[in-house]
Image (cartoon, rainbow, N blue to C red):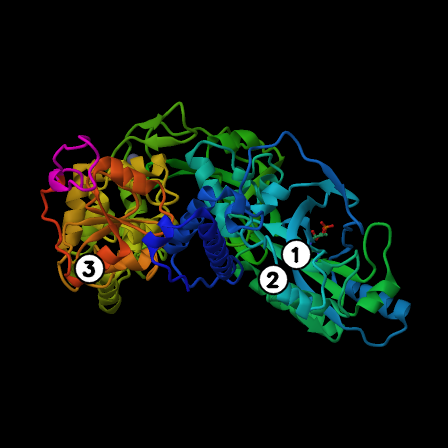
Amino acid sequence: MYTERPFLSILRGRMAKSATTAKQIEKFREELRRHEYLYFVKDDPEISDVKFDRMMEELKRLETKHPELITPDSPTQRVGGAARKGFETRRHTPAMLSLDNTYSTEELEDFDRRVRELSGRDQVDYVTEHKFDGLSISLVYEGGMLARGVTRGDGTTGEEVTANVRTIRSIPLRVDAAELKKLYLPGDFEVRGEIIMPLRAFEALNEKQEEEGGKRFSNPRSAAAGAVRVLDPEITRSRRLDFYGYYLLSGGKMPTRRHSESLEALHKLHFKVSPDWRVCHSLDGVKKFIDVWEGKREKLSYEIDGIVIKVDEIALQQELGFTARAPRWAVAYKYPARQETTVVNDVLFQVGRTGTLTPVAVLEPVQVGGVLVSRSTLHNMDEIARLGLHIGDTVIVERAGEVIPHVIQVIKEGKPRRAVAVPERCPECHSHIHKDPEEVAYRCVNASCPAKRKESLLHFAGRRAMNIDGLGEKVVDQLVDKGLVKDFADLYELKLEDVAALDRMAEKSAQNLLDEIAASKSNSLARLIYALGMRFVGERTGQLLAEHFASLPKLAEASVEEMEEVTEVGPKVAQSITDFFSESANRKLIERLKNEGLKMTEKRAAPVDTLLAGKTFVFTGALARRSRDEAGAEVVRHGGKATNSVSKLTSYVVVGADPGSKYDKAHTLGVTILNEDEFDDLLAGRRKVEPDEAPAQKSSTKAKGKSRSKKTSSGHQ
Ligand code: AMP
Ligand code: ZN
């Protein structure tokens, strides 16, 4: 533990300080690496995102003060430098080969027979793995540190995309030396695997593209490939890619006796390895694995297009060798494409939550990979133009993961061929349809269009929002059409007899629905914020806002600047939120929801007293006896508030070792500055809390003459 008293350490000479700082920085890095691993590789975080971000900021701050201590393996160094002009090419040794494909059990049996004949063995162990549908990549480590990331390219040479690869948080920038030693591995080694875009990231990306009028990506693989091969690493970072490792090489060879041991070693080195691989002692086991995953692959968070089968024993792999394009010891089994051809019978327009018209193809029903598909989204008119789609055309539809089916291509023109026309009036309320020239989308202009209402209610009730089971399309349609529900608050005023009178609704299920609605009142604040359906406020943003503001009324009052204090909340999002809350109808809605008893605050330890009520604290520098988060929590326990930036409204700035610019700012603004001992005195009641309207009396720390303006503490809050 770091125990030095903060003020002493500030006064000390540079030399002594930098030794402590170096240690402190390295400790931070280790902590951050561990949390990165827990979050991005194990998917099992121990701390909140906000806390993680704070730690990261703290490290960045320390490193900015001590640039000489920055190392390339620091977690802060994932994005650095500007966009480049082009990529260098790099050779792969050995080449990154392709895999032979099989599509049937017979072809698999042929493969197994060939392996056994060539090796003269009766029985061979195989490893079965997911065939990730992404982009293969080679990661070269030198001295345990990530030195290069190179795309497969033509197999012999690829493009060096190191800066981009570094932004992928599940890729370790360095591996643990002790772990390498345990595995008898040198610091120079190579990991090959697949960069993928998880389905949720893919959907979010397309949603965003749509909102911003950009081009949609047709599948996660091309989106991932595009994101890796851009010149600006910042773009790669924003795409939330992931990496799964499946080969370990050292000196161009596999360093283990078995492939399965390589997978285990990768796992121990903290690379992300899918847990869904097996060793099969016979082809029957392989077939079973293939069958199981054909059914379950829909549930995965990423796309797979098949299963890879590899000979487990490395000696046997070497014996079998390679053909010109692929190893003889491995093969891919490709799942049948989930694509079918069918005819577009009509195109309808659906009105979404924001009034957007979305064209939907009405298809001649067709089985696609075991699911009957009769509708398919066409996204927007630009997409229809791109496809050249007309009513009556024969098209290919594709299903991928849990993503809704979509038309990927027109293959035959229909006769007669009718062009798709945007309706002049809203199909739901017959109001006018308007198109903003800046946008792709057409919208219904009617603010209270029932379609918008219905979509908003469905979103509100959605599993990831208020999770009201039983409030599906059929019920919402009736509730809105009968005028029983106009907004979210009306849901909480529904009466049993009204609900029971709906079509196909027994008294029992009506009661269940009311119970579900009532239960949703105690949902987390994060869910509520997301459920409100503000533009650009997705699930994650909802969480971050809930953690930061801990109260809906506070969020509603917050200024754009205060919102931008939340990591990941940019000006566009902040503006959208303030727009929402400045609408008086929305304010009334929130008020009603509050009166209905919805939970509007986040669970946080209740204040033990009001000692610091009305006081705002900012912490800067490293405290000796607590983390800054803990210090913030103590302030909250005593009824105060902890924020990140110093302003005239700040009551106290508490300064630890190596304080940042907030310290200077506190000086300039004349905010009272405390060291940690003084902060302790304040908490223990040994030091008097300053009265509210006294900024002008802080003579000892106030800057000369500046910022005497009286603070009207209610004005900005
Ligand atoms: P293909 O692109 O159809 O020739 O298939 C070969 C590619 O499959 C390889 O280059 C890898 O990028 C990819 N692949 C995906 N998952 C795996 C896996 N588990 N093991 C080996 N290769 C894989
Ligand atoms: Zn309408």
Tell me the chief SS of the magenta region: loop
Q: Quadrant of the N terminus?
A: bottom left
Tell me the amino acid under the disc marked 3. Answer: Asp
Tell me the amino acid under the disc marked 2. Answer: Asp
Q: Find out if the beta carbon at label 2 lies less than 8 Å from the nearest ligand 1 atom.
A: no
Query: Which residue is drawn at the image coordinates 37% and 45% (left, top)?
Result: 567
**Could you tell me which secondary element the residue under label 3 belongs to?**
helix
Q: Residue furthest top?
A: 437
Q: Is residue 1 left or right of residue 173?
A: left
Q: Is residue 504 left or right of residue 216?
A: left
**Could you tell me which secondary element the residue under label 2 belongs to?**
loop
Q: Which residue is mark 3?
A: 681
Q: Earlier in the sequence, mark 3 or mark 1?
A: 1
* 131, above or below 287, in the image: above
Q: Nearer the viewer, mark 2 or mark 3?
A: 3
Distance in Å between CA atoms under marks 2 and 1: 7 Å
Tell me the amino acid under the disc marked 1. Answer: Gly
Instruction: Give the magenta part as a residue range.
Output: 696-717
Q: Is residue 32 left or right of residue 565?
A: right
Question: x, y percentage for residue 501?
Answer: 20, 59
Question: x, y percentage for residue 528?
Answer: 27, 53
Q: Which residue is mark 1?
A: 144
* Circle 3 crowding by C-alpha within 10 Å: few under 14, some 14–19, many from 20: some
Query: Which residue is drawn at the image coordinates 63% and 49% (left, top)?
Result: 134
Circles 2 and 1: CB atoms closer than 8 Å: yes
Mark drawn on residue 176:
2
